[in-house]
Amino acid sequence: MADEATRALAGFAAGLAYERIPERVRTHCKNLLLDALACALAGDKGEETHQVSALAAALGQSRECSVIGGDRLTLAGATLLNGYLITAVTMCDVHRATLTHITPEVVPPALAIAERDAVSGRDLLVALAAGCEVTTRIGIGLDFPEFRRRGWHGPGVIGPFGAAAAAGRLLRFDDETMARAFGLAGSQAAGTFAAWGTPTVKFHQCRGALSGLMAALLAQQGFVATREFLTAPDGGLYSTYTNGGRPGDATSGLGERWELEQIALRPWPSASTIQGMITAMFDLTEKHGLSPERVEKVRVSMGKAAMDLHGIFPHYKGKFEALLSTHYAAAIILHDRALTLAQFEPARYEDPKLRRFAAERVEMSVDPSLTGAQAVVKARLTDGSSVTSRCDHPRGSYENPLAPEEVAGKFRTYAKGRLTEARIEEAIAAVSRLEELQSARKLMDLLRTGRQNALSTAA
């Protein structure tokens, strides 16, 4: 049936109930939310954040929704800016099968609607699960290699659907309204890898969040849109953006096997595809007590796709290229045995010694047997010996997950100095017991640092 995938996903999102979500999936959704909040608080350090902040403020003057780590903006402005904040410093989640960051699109509109309407934490959790599952499900139906070959970038293309699903679930859409919201989301699907290496790839994500919000709000008004956007033969997502895709994969086991569990978290700021290399580099450095003085050469082997994206910045220019650079990541881990935002401040990445090491003593090679984020790191030592580490599953992946306390540690790291210690611990507790929160406004009040930051009476 031409409309099977769209309608099946719409019915799933509209009808999802808390009781149908397994406990492990609820826990992962809470981890995704807390990680997104940590990234957003760190996003204040993004080089372009002030520019997106100005755009968000220009969208209107009402103040009904909170900016994470900021004040208040319009529903649209808060959605756009929070989406950018989550991705601003390149350490948010990633669905590796589609190279798509999920929370920058799904979390902001869900938080905005939940705060505006004083929605319960339980309903917010269900909406997040619906949005994340819809985004990843549509993604695995794409035939991603073909989608990528055509140059499309996932967040701006499939992200609007998940944003619409999360917002629509909070607005209590029925199946038909949700399907129309998906049609409106698909009509805004855009973003290509022509933007790679520039901040525009991050704009794809926050724009995807805003597109999904607009789709849901317009569908709420009864606006007419196709209810079979994914598989429409003329202009549908799967027939136009790829080669027809695999719509059956998008719906197979829906509600039984949860694709959102494959969304990986990033313990370190740096590009998602080099998290395997970073994991291997830390393992190698810690196991053998390596220092720059002991290392003559570092050789990093990755798959061709990873190499094409991240092996091209031996002479990185500015913070964003440093965040994308395998050369810089290997060099800084060896020198500092740490990789936080402190390693991406100009005073550190502009260090001449680090620049020389990254350009002259870190070598890259393609290993056709490696795929995704897999990596092998080999260090040739000054005494003539060599040591090697391989990573198949980066830290934070489904196979090598972060524990909730580790995610909380990331939140504490980047909330420090932005929020009081008391608020930090209250926010962590609120997310960990999200089902018990009577109103999402309580959580957003804890996260706001602007002049209207008094706690609301809603619990």
Image: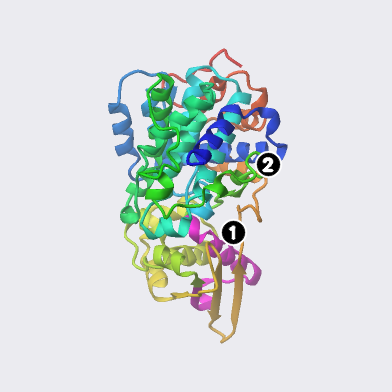
**Few, some or many C-alpha atoms within 10 Å of disc 1 (few <14, some 14-19, many ≥20)?**
many
Asked if the magenta segment contains residue 293, the reply would be yes
Foreground mark, 1 or 2, reads 2
Specify start and end residues of the magenta stretch as a single range. Answer: 271-300
Q: Which residue is mark 2?
A: 256
Image coords of residue 253 (percent x, y) = 65, 44
Would residue 58 be seen by someone viewing this image from the given angle?
yes
Q: Quadrant of residue 352?
A: bottom left
Q: Which is more N-terminal, label 2 or label 1?
A: 2
- Looking at the picture, does residue 294 appear above or below residue 405? below
Q: Residue at x 67, y 23 (%)?
A: 436
222 or 266, nearer to the observer: 222
Q: Which mark is residue 394?
A: 1
Q: What kind of residue is marked 2?
A: Glu
Asked if the magenta segment contains residue 291, the reply would be yes
- Looking at the picture, does residue 345 appear above or below residue 106? below
Is 251 on the left or on the right of 318, as rendered? right
SS under mark 2: loop
SS under mark 1: loop
Is 64 on the left or on the right of 406, as rendered? left
